Amino acid sequence: MARYSLRLIDRTDIEHFASERAREEREVAEVPQREVAEVTDILRSYGLDEEDAARVVKSIKADKKRWVDFMMRFEVGLEAPDPSAPAPTQVSFIEVLAKHLRMKGLIVGSRRHQLEMIRAIDASGLKPVVDSIHPLDGLADAFRHQEGHRHFGKICLEF
């Protein structure tokens, strides 16, 4: 019986981390001004003003390893994998089908991917389909509406 990994990529976490780190190291060396702008954007998204962000950026970029570490964590969204962590779970696709199991999950990309997606959505003019808007004190109603599986589009909270 064939067994499939729940992993969506062929490479191991270690190989993936290494390739992303190598890319960040190249970018820090080849396009440092763009990387400085990215660090500044990240810091500004956490509420730092321009002056404070500039001081932090100066400190971060003074050490190339620290700079790449920062970009890996806050731009790419990866941390060094733990080599002692257990291997990914292996499951039989046939068993999943036979048992009528429902698999749910959430795939989260890197911060860079999220920012690229937001820019693409903004540029294209795409707008989400809104099914309903509920006040925050109507949260329970919003969940009941979702559980009813009759909605089409996003169920939003207003606060």
Image (cartoon, rainbow, N blue to C red):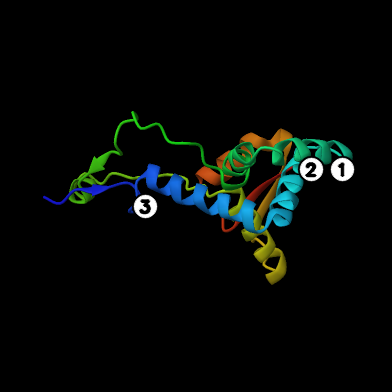
The mark found on residue 50 in the picture is 1
Q: Front-most of 5 and 84? A: 84
Q: Residues within 10 Å of mark 2 (few under 14, many from 20)?
A: some
Residues marked 1 and 2 touching at CB (< 8 Å) = yes
The reply, left or right, for residue 21 in relation to residue 81 is right
**Which mark lies nearer to you, 3 or 2?**
2
Give the mark nearest the N terminus, 1 or 2: 2
Q: Residues within 10 Å of mark 3 (few under 14, many from 20)?
A: few
The mark found on residue 65 in the picture is none
x and y percentages locating residue 30 in the rendered image: 63, 58
Residue lying at 51% horizontally and 37% vertically, measured from the top left:
79
Q: Quadrant of the C terminus?
A: top right
**Which mark lies nearer to you, 1 or 2?**
1
Q: Front-most of 113 and 82? A: 82
Q: SS of the residue at dot 1?
A: helix
- Which residue in the protein does label 3 denote? 8
Q: Front-most of 32 and 123? A: 32
Q: SS of the residue at dot 3?
A: loop
Tell me if residue 44 can be seen. Answer: yes
What type is the residue that disc 2 sits on? Arg
* Residue 82, quarter of the rendered image: top left
What type is the residue that disc 3 sits on? Leu
Residue lying at 60% horizontally and 43% vertically, measured from the top left:
68
- Which residue in the protein does label 2 denote? 44
x and y percentages locating residue 41 in the rendered image: 75, 48
